[in-house]
């Protein structure tokens, strides 16, 4: 979901905020509803410095994952556990439902303890955006390998094939893997509760591995619920005078925020209805959406006590880190319900770094339930 903020004039700002909507969810038990495609994204993870050391062997053979996401802690996931759901290779949870990462990876090989020297690096993507990558070393470069019969896995070499460069021993392999999770469906899912296995970020060799759990859910609840969100997807802040006072409010716009949900009898349930926003954070503050050029930010505030104040100097408004913001409850005795609120967007100054000219910003909004 892309959002724009346009700035006009040398010392003025004219801004646009545009929202995309999707269906999403969160909680220890993950809940999805009707529909097909990517029905949820969330649970971001970042794993840094997964690190192991090679043994003294100049001809190491491997099918391990230099960088991988797996249901195992020591090896890449088997392709027999993945299936094509809505054109995506996902881990099958139940009929027509799968989970898949949306991740990026960087792995380096270094030598030396006190002053390590990098001798090779592998970068790539894992999961929904394709599992692929490239590597460079001090002697060669090429495409990363997805080992035979393995998925969500990147390596320098396939099983039975030597490394494309020499390993002398005691090299340290360090992986950084970050991203989030998605649930994909094909529309044939059946109501019920299903087990989601633990998932790990791993880096491994034939004799060593390190892993960290990155998927917090243990159960997936499939329901007969469908929700739609209606709001102004192109918010025009107009032209505002440039003010370099930190936390100054430059402009604000109030727009409707309406969520409409329905569920099919007899599979009705009680569930919380939430909205969820995500985007680039300003200075790591989860209540501030960064302008792409930096120097300023946007806040949001939902009325009826749904959030706290969204004033530019507050930290209590809409959060942009996939957190659930509850707007109501859909009862098991209700086949449909509409939750009507308003959201106030504020364009805020970050101080002297506030830009002039054209700027952009982006945010995603989703309906979630748990």
Image (spheres, helix red, strand yellow):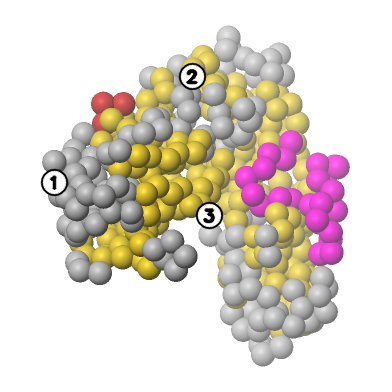
Q: Is residue 6 magenta?
A: no
Q: In terms of sequence position, does the residue under pointer 1 or pointer 3 come before the other?
A: 3
Secondary element under disc 1, as helix, strand or loop, is loop
Q: In this picture, which residue range is highlighted in magenta?
A: 303-326
Tag in front: 2 or 3? 2
Residue 331 horizontal/vertical position (percent): 72, 19
Q: CA distance from mark 2 to mark 3?
A: 30 Å
Do residues under tags 1 and 3 come within 8 Å of each other at their CB atoms?
Answer: no
Q: From the image, tell me which residue sits under label 3.
A: 1
Q: CA distance from mark 2 to mark 1?
A: 36 Å
| 144, 137: nearer the viewer | 137
Q: From the image, tell me which residue sits under label 1.
A: 161
| 145, 313: nearer the viewer | 145
Tag in front: 1 or 3? 1
Q: In terms of sequence position, does the residue under pointer 2 or pointer 3 come before the other?
A: 3
Residue at position x 63%, y 30% from top? 27
Residue 138 horizontal/vertical position (percent): 25, 69
Residue 357 horizontal/vertical position (percent): 62, 84
Residue 184 horizontal/vertical position (percent): 42, 34
Residue at position x 49%, y 17% from top? 194
Q: From the image, tell me which residue sits under label 2.
A: 195
Q: CA distance from mark 1 to mark 3?
A: 42 Å
Q: In terms of sequence position, does the residue under pointer 2 or pointer 1 come before the other?
A: 1
Q: Badge 1 local density, few (<14 within 10 Å), some, or many (20+)?
A: some
Q: Is residue 304 magenta?
A: yes
Secondary element under disc 3, as helix, strand or loop, is loop
Indicate the quadrant containing the C terminus: top left, top right, bottom left or bottom right: top right
Whether residue 189 sits left or right of residue 60 in the image: it is right
- The answer to which quarter of the image holds residue 5 is bottom right
Secondary element under disc 2, as helix, strand or loop, is strand
């Amino acid at each position: 979901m892309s959002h724009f903020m346009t700035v006009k004039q040398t010392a003025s700002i004219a801004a646009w905020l545009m929202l995309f909507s999707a269906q999403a969810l969160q909680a220890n038990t993950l809940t999805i509803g009707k529909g097909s495609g990517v029905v949820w994204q969330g649970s971001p993870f970042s794993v840094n410095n997964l690190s192991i050391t090679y043994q003294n062997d100049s001809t190491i053979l491997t099918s391990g994952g230099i960088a991988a996401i797996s249901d195992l802690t020591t090896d890449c996931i088997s392709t027999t556990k993945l299936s094509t759901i809505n054109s995506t290779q996902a881990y099958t949870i139940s009929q027509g439902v799968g989970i898949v990462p949306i991740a990026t990876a960087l792995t380096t090989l270094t030598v030396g303890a006190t002053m390590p020297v990098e001798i090779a690096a592998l970068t790539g993507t894992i999961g929904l955006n394709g599992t692929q990558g490239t590597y460079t070393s001090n002697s060669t470069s090429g495409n990363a390998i997805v080992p035979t019969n393995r998925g969500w896995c990147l390596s320098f070499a396939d099983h039975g094939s030597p490394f494309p460069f020499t390993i002398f021993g005691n090299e340290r392999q360090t992986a950084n893997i970050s991203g989030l999770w998605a649930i994909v469906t094909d529309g044939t899912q059946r109501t019920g509760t299903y087990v989601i296995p633990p998932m790990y970020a791993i880096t491994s060799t034939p004799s060593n591995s390190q892993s960290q759990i990155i998927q917090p859910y243990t159960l997936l609840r499939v329901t007969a619920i469908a929700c739609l969100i209606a709001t102004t997807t192109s918010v025009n802040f107009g032209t505002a005078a440039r003010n370099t006072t930190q936390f100054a409010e430059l402009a604000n716009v109030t727009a409707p925020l309406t969520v409409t949900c329905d569920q099919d009898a007899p599979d009705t349930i009680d569930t919380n209805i939430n909205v969820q926003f995500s985007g680039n954070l300003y200075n790591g503050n989860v209540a501030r959406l960064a302008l792409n050029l930096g120097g300023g930010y946007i806040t949001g505030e939902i009325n009826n006590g749904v959030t706290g104040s969204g004033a530019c100097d507050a930290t209590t408004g809409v959060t942009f880190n996939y957190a659930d913001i509850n707007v109501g409850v859909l009862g098991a005795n209700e086949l449909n319900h509409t939750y009507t609120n308003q959201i106030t967007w504020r364009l805020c100054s970050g101080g002297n770094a506030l830009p002039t000219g054209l700027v952009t910003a982006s945010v995603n909004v989703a309906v979630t339930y748990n």
